[in-house]
Image: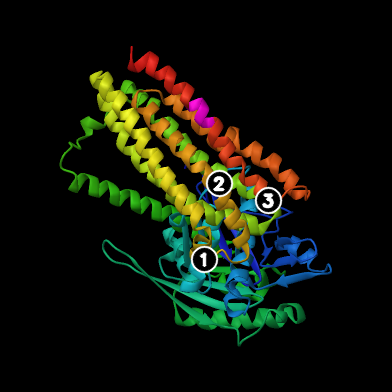
Amino acid sequence: MGKGIILGIDFSIDFTQMAVLDDEINPRSISIGTEDNFLIPSVVCYNSELNEWSAGDEAVNKSRLNNSTEYRKLPEILKQNYGEDLTKQIITTYMSYLLKVAVNYSNGKLIKNVLVTLNEVTPEMIELITTSFTNLGYNANDIKIISHSESFVYYVLNQGKDIWINQVYFLNFDRNDFSCRKLNVIKGKQVHVADVTVEDLNDRMTYDSVKNNMDMADEIVADYMEDQLKKNVVSGVFLSGEGFYAEGWAKTLQTICRNRRVFKGNNLIVKGAAYATVIGQIASAVLLLVFQIKLNKEFEHGVKYMKPDAGIIKEIYAIGLPAIIAQALMSIMVYVMNLILKFNPSAQTAYGLFYKVQQFVLFLAFGLRDAITPIIAFAYGMRSKKRIQDGIKYGLIYTIALMILGIAITEIFPGAFATLFNAGQSRAYFISAMRVISLSFLFAGINVAYQGIYQAVNSGMESLVISLLRQLVIILPLAGIFSIFARNGQMGVALIWWAFPITEVIACLVGYVFLKRIRKNKVLK
């Protein structure tokens, strides 16, 4: 599955659980602190004295300090009257913490897809969670949100057919929920339909029943399952949730283990979420292949045309690999910048919001680059010096004109953009970021044009160097050094923003040197 991982998040009221799917066939549960601790408290804390946000176990501990405000039961946060800005800040803080935990657990691997599963999915919660991840630099298309019932279906159907040949029961028992999901796979000749019903069992007992009278709790669950097994043919039973982690449940297990598969464990729902992401990607790939074969009649699709040619592959990657790395570097840069800004969540949020504005402006340069690259490449293939020179000349002129327009709009209307993107408490940081980083657009646009020119004249290595300078080698160490002064209170956060124009100017100078060399060695040769 490549270098990226798929992250599944079971975002529940009291605790959150996570699982990752990488090169392994099965998802792996993420443990916290110890190997058998998979529960992350759904808690966020803000200390006004330190101006510091924290999440998870750290938030629980820091909530005991003076001047600390604790926010619990995060999936129900929309029911609280915190205000839109504060609500977004809380969820963004928590999701940022989960991402950090997942990356550390996966030894620094990049997260390419995130699937969040909730007990109750609402449009408001979808928007809130999606916004929190986009503020952290993720693409909204890489974030999926589904219900526990849907995750349950994905998990079960990825197990052996003997488990779901008949009905499957999923009992979840935690501090705020005691329920039973019943899966019935209606089998057809070609397509199977999965039907899930949910039964609320909270009126039968509470989580405290396990602590106060384990035998009684065991009796209640055993009697319930005994009644269900008399009415239905059940081939599989899953027990999940903090309540079932407790020692005991002897009678329950004795009842349900007769003539069927029984699973008692953690993270079953979130593992289903990870499976859902993989299945979605596979389904998309299959559909694209079908559309390519059925609708694209301009090319032959026979097997003989799929025979690999080492020479052609080498030529493709000589030009395309720098572009691939450049795209990967964008994600790395955004992620590391969020780590650098972690000391100030408002600045972190502001950067996430401004990144959208920045990409909107730079997409003008990207679009123009994609237009001039084939034009210059065609001229290069014809060995037409004049056409190459004209392509370079007018490509740069048009790019500069668009970037000047972008700078003018962002510098004149920063407040309007802050309102448009609902910057809220991060408004001041957002405006300062726009004032400073926007100055880099001119040089960033030129650098983007340079990269297109380099690729057109078969100079992929030069394009790669510019990408590395812009998005890794200069920007991140410089921002890291500036953040030290900001954290110490010697300078404001705005100092960090200056890393962007400085980086683009340096990269632009290097790019100009490359262009002169290319003109001499390849264009005028």
Marks 2 and 1 sit apart, C-alpha to C-alpha, by 18 Å
Residue 303 seen by the camera: yes
Q: Note whether 519 is above or below 19 in the view shown.
A: above
Q: Quadrant of the C terminus?
A: top left
Kind of residue at badge 3: Val
Residue for point 60% across, 77% down:
177
Question: Does the segment drawn in magenta span residue 314?
Answer: no
Residue tagged 1:
419
Numbered label attached to residue 437? 2
Name the foreground residue: 199 vs 229. 199
Looking at the rendering, which quadrant does residue 517 occupy? top left
Numbered label attached to residue 376? none
In the rendered structure, are the residues bearing label 2 and label 1 in contact, judged by CB atoms less than 8 Å apart?
Answer: no
Residue tagged 3:
493
Q: Note whether 507 is above or below 164 in the view shown.
A: above
Kind of residue at badge 2: Ile
Marks 1 and 3 sit apart, C-alpha to C-alpha, by 21 Å
Marks 2 and 3 sit apart, C-alpha to C-alpha, by 12 Å
Q: Is 251 left or right of 294, judged from the image as shown?
A: right
Q: Secondary structure at mark 1?
A: helix
Label 1 vs 3, first from the N-terminus:
1
Label 2 vs 1, first from the N-terminus:
1
Q: Residues within 10 Å of mark 1 (few under 14, many from 20)?
A: few
Name the foreground residue: 239 vs 115. 115
Q: Residues within 10 Å of mark 2 (few under 14, many from 20)?
A: many
Magenta residues, as a range?
Answer: 507-511
